[in-house]
Image: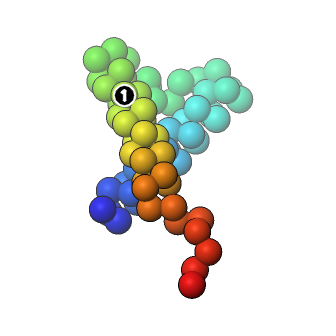
Amino acid sequence: MKMTTLLCCGALIVFGLCACITALTGFDVLRAAVCGNETVYRALLSFAGVAALWLLFWLVVFRPTRPLR
C-alpha cells in the first residue's frame, strides 16, 4: 500500500513537471519521450489519471492529515 502511494506520488510529480515544461516552452516532453507514439502517450496520460484517483482514495480512506494522537 505504501509503495503504491509513493509510486503514484512520484508519477504525478513527473507528469506535473512535464506539464510545466510544456506550458512554459511549448515543447511536449512526454510526447517526445514516447517518440510520438499516440497509443503509448494516451496510456501514460491514463496512468496519470489512475494515479490521481488512487491518491484521492488514499486521502479519503486513510486521512493522513488527521492529528496524531
Counting from the top left corner in percent of width and height, residue 30 is at 45, 30
Query: Quick one: 41 or 45, which is closer to the camera?
Result: 45
Residue on which the image places disc 1: 46
Give the answer, above or below, for where 1 lies relative to 23: below
Q: Is residue 64 left or right of residue 50?
A: right
Categorize mark 1 by other alpha carbons within 10 Å: few (<14), some (14-19), many (20+): few
Give the answer, above or below, for where 68 lies relative to 62: below
Single out the residue that lies furthest toward the top: 38
Counting from the top left corner in percent of width and height, residue 22 is at 61, 27
Q: Amino acid at mark 1?
A: Ser
Report whether residue 28 is seen: yes
Counting from the top left corner in percent of width and height, residue 21 is at 63, 34
Single out the residue that lies furthest toward the bottom: 69
Q: What residue is drawn where x is 50% and y is 38%?
A: 15
Q: What residue is drawn where x is 43% and y is 23%?
A: 31
Give the answer, above or below, for where 51 lies relative to 9: above
Image quadrant where residue 27 sits: top right
- If the image is split into quadrants, where does the N terminus sit? bottom left
Q: What residue is drawn where x is 42% and y is 33%?
A: 49
Query: Quick one: 32 or 9, which is closer to the camera?
Result: 9
Report whether residue 33 is seen: no
Q: Is residue 65 left or right of residue 6?
A: right
Query: Quick one: 24 or 16, which is closer to the camera?
Result: 16
